[in-house]
Amino acid sequence: MTEVDSLHKNSLSRILKKVLKNKGWDTKVREHRVFDLWESEVGGPIAKNTRPKSISRGVLFVIAKSSVWVQELTLKKPDIIKRLNIRLGGELIKDIKFAQGEIPAKKDVKTPEESRDRIRVDRKLVDNYTKEIGDEDLRKIIGKVLSKALSFKDEA
């Protein structure tokens, strides 16, 4: 990478960080990293019996295989929150709500229908987040970055 390429990459990185921060998306992007960090932070046995389902306003919703796991995790909640927040780089997770439910299997391969549905949902989400960006080129670039970030989350 040449010095000019490095300068452009750093400039684009700063611009993206600034746009994300100005739009209030930086926290949401950081919050959603929890889906990628869950297994490494809670460990194999817990990860095998739980799945983070969603996050909203600092509250992480997690499905556990049984009521026994819900109780066990409720006792471990302060430690789990602390570990996740350390990895997320701030006090992003304020609470975790555990509920008993069926743990969806991790899918390595999606059916064509699932992929098309996911693309439609992601496109709407990206369009919604970028619709107020006046500069068309910048809107397209940020749209591509957000689409890529959503696809990485889905691969975890």
Image (cartoon, grey):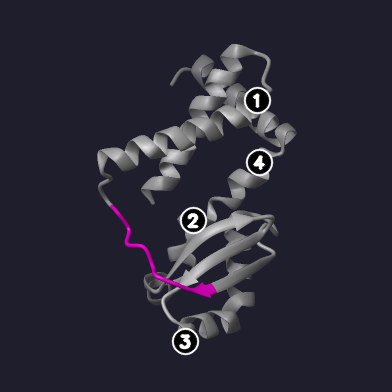
Q: Is residue 8 visible?
A: no
Q: Residue at x 59, y 20 (%)?
A: 139
Looking at marks 3 and 4 on the same chain, the residue that comes earlier in the sequence is marked by: 4
Is 103 contained in the magenta span?
yes
Please name the amino acid that badge 3 sits on.
Val
The spot of residue 54 in percent (x, y) is 54, 57
Main secondary-structure element of the magenta-colored stretch: loop
The residue drawn where x is 55% and y is 35% is 125
Q: Earlier in the sequence, mark 3 or mark 1?
A: 1
Q: Are marks 4 and 2 in contact (CB under 8 Å)?
A: no
Quickly name the residue at label 3: 68
**Which residue bears the numbered disc 4?**
26
**Labels 2 and 3: the sequence-earlier one:** 2
At horizontal 62% and vertical 22% (from top left) the residue drawn is: 11
Mark 4 vs 2, N-terminal side: 4
Please state the horizontal and vertical placement of residue 16, each as a whole percent of the image: 62, 28
* Mark 2 or mark 1, earlier in chain: 1
What is the C-alpha distance between the residues marked 2 and 1?
26 Å
Q: CA distance from mark 4 to mark 1?
A: 12 Å
Amino acid bearing label 1? Ile
Percent coordinates x, y for residue 17 in the rendering: 65, 33
Q: Which residues are magenta?
A: 99-107
Per the image, the residue denoted by label 2 is 35
Q: Does residue 120 sit above or below 29 in this rendering? A: above
Q: In the image, is residue 19 part of the stretch drawn in magenta?
A: no
Q: CA distance from mark 2 to mark 3?
A: 22 Å
Identify residue for label 1. Answer: 15
Tell me how far mark 3 sits from mark 1, CA to CA.
47 Å
Query: Secondary structure under badge 2?
Result: helix
**Which amino acid type is shown beneath numbered disc 2?**
Phe
Picture quadrant of residue 19 = top right
Q: Looking at the picture, how far across and down is residue 109, in whole percent?
A: 25, 47
